[in-house]
Amino acid sequence: MFELIVVLYNMTYSDSPTINSLNKLLTSDFFPEIQKVLIFDNSDQATQPNGLEARFTYQHSQENVGLAKAYNYAIKQREQKTEWLVTLDQDTQLTNAYLKEMLLKAKTLPEKVVAIAPVIMDQQQQISPVRSDTLRPLHKELPQGDQVFSSDIMVINSGTAIRIDFLLQINGYNEEFSLDYLDHWLSWKIFAEQRQLYSLKTILQHDLSVL
């Protein structure tokens, strides 16, 4: 079973491409493997959602706690049967193909594979996965989808599914990296624990602000 967390910052749920696309997908195709979607709102003002599919829940933080604490909150609040946590930014356009491939692969991948991530593009630029053994990852040969990796790869947080058992083993997300470099830390941690990461064939579009 899967739970998803979408972290918002100074954007309402109704303006989020992630929430809008996910709401349409869950409403039309249902995807029973997904049992809960937590909207964790780091914005200054709370905006209680309405009109969303029944599996959406909402939590507003009184302060901007970043990503790591939001993800760790989701881990603590998870349902007992949850096996995977999918982390999502507010500006990723989700697709039917992504959800179907991720849910299918989760049933067949060996336990050593603890993360499943799509190929992420910002317009024509691939931003995930990228190589982590270079200071210029966007200017090297880029990793391809439909592969298992054991080292030297970084994937961004948005769209990545992580096994709950692995997250518990490493005591959750490292809150010293509250926002920046959290994805670098997690990718490094996966390989440091001698686990693996699988890159899906599916491509998603994402607005990466640093570009």
Image (cartoon, rainbow, N blue to C red):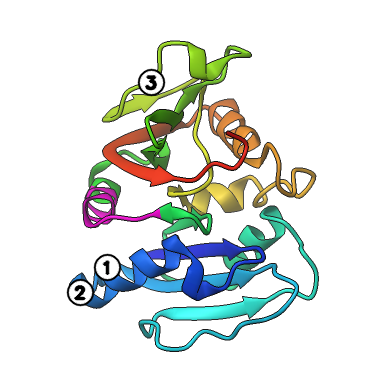
Query: Does 115 sit left or right of 44 as displayed?
Result: left
* Rendered image quadrant of residue 94: bottom left
Taking the magenta stretch, the answer to whether it contains residue 98 is yes
- Estimate the spatial distance between the alpha carbons at disc 3 and disc 2, rounded to whole Å: 33 Å
Would you say the magenta stretch is mainly helix, strand or loop? helix
Left or right of 92 on screen, residue 157: right
The residue tagged 1 is: 25
**Residue 49 percent across, percent down from the top left:** 51, 84
- The residue labelled by disc 3 is 143
Q: Which residue is mark 2?
A: 28
Query: At which x and y percent is residue 98?
Result: 28, 50
Quadrant position of residue 61 = bottom right
Q: Earlier in the sequence, mark 3 or mark 2?
A: 2
Which range of residues does the magenta coloring cover? 93-104
Dot 1 amino acid type? Leu
Find numbered disc 3 in the image and state the secondary structure of the residue it sits on: loop
Quadrant assignment for the N terminus: bottom left
Residue depicted at 30% across the width and 40% down the height = 203
Please state which of residues 20 and 64 is positioned toward the viewer in this rendering. 20
- In the image, residue 72 lies in the stretch drawn in magenta: no
The residue at 67%/50% (across/down) is 171
